[in-house]
Image (cartoon, rainbow, N blue to C red):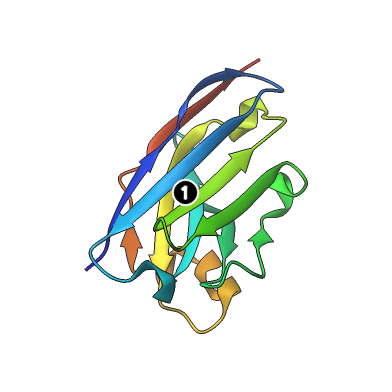
Amino acid sequence: QIQLVETGGGLVQAGGSLRLSCTASGQPFSGYVMGWFRQAPGKEREFVAVISWSGDDPYYTDSVKGRFTISRDNFQNTVYLQMNSLKPEDTAVYYCAAGQVVTTRTLSSPRTVDYWGQGTQVTVSS
């Protein structure tokens, strides 16, 4: 069992930045591929970004490429999502995800996620 706790959400104006953090506990963090998903009101949960256990091979959904950066610190058991140039359409609850999957990109599907965090709200005002 692994527990995930997200922090860092909030209200920001369009064009601003936020950094989300997700800290894991319960099992060795380094054995998991980690990712971020988001869910806007009335919409399905969607993939945002994923990173391998070693911190290589980040993969992003097209709408955030060039604006968001995922990273991890295995010593701190934490994965980060740096979000720059935020847009109103980025408004959603952001969820941290962990999965023991064969390839990094496999975790881009919510069905492959083994553990979810509780979510943190990000609101971008226009």
What residue type is disc 1 on?
Glu
- In the rendered structure, the answer to whether residue 86 lies left or right of residue 43 reads right
Which quarter of the figure has residue 58?
Answer: bottom right
Residue for badge 1: 44
Comparing 85 with 77, the one in front is 77
Q: Where is residue 101 in the image (x, y as percent from the top left)?
A: 46, 79
Q: Quadrant of the C terminus?
A: top right
Q: In which quarter of the image is the N terminus?
A: bottom left
Q: Where is residue 89 in the image (x, y as percent from the top left)?
A: 63, 31
Extreme-front residue of the structure: 75
Q: Is mark 1 on a helix, strand or loop?
A: loop
The answer to whether residue 63 is above or below residue 104 is above
Comparing 90 with 55, the one in front is 55
Extreme-right residue of the structure: 66
Can residue 41 be seen here? The reply is yes
Q: Position of residue 18 (x, y in %)?
A: 57, 31
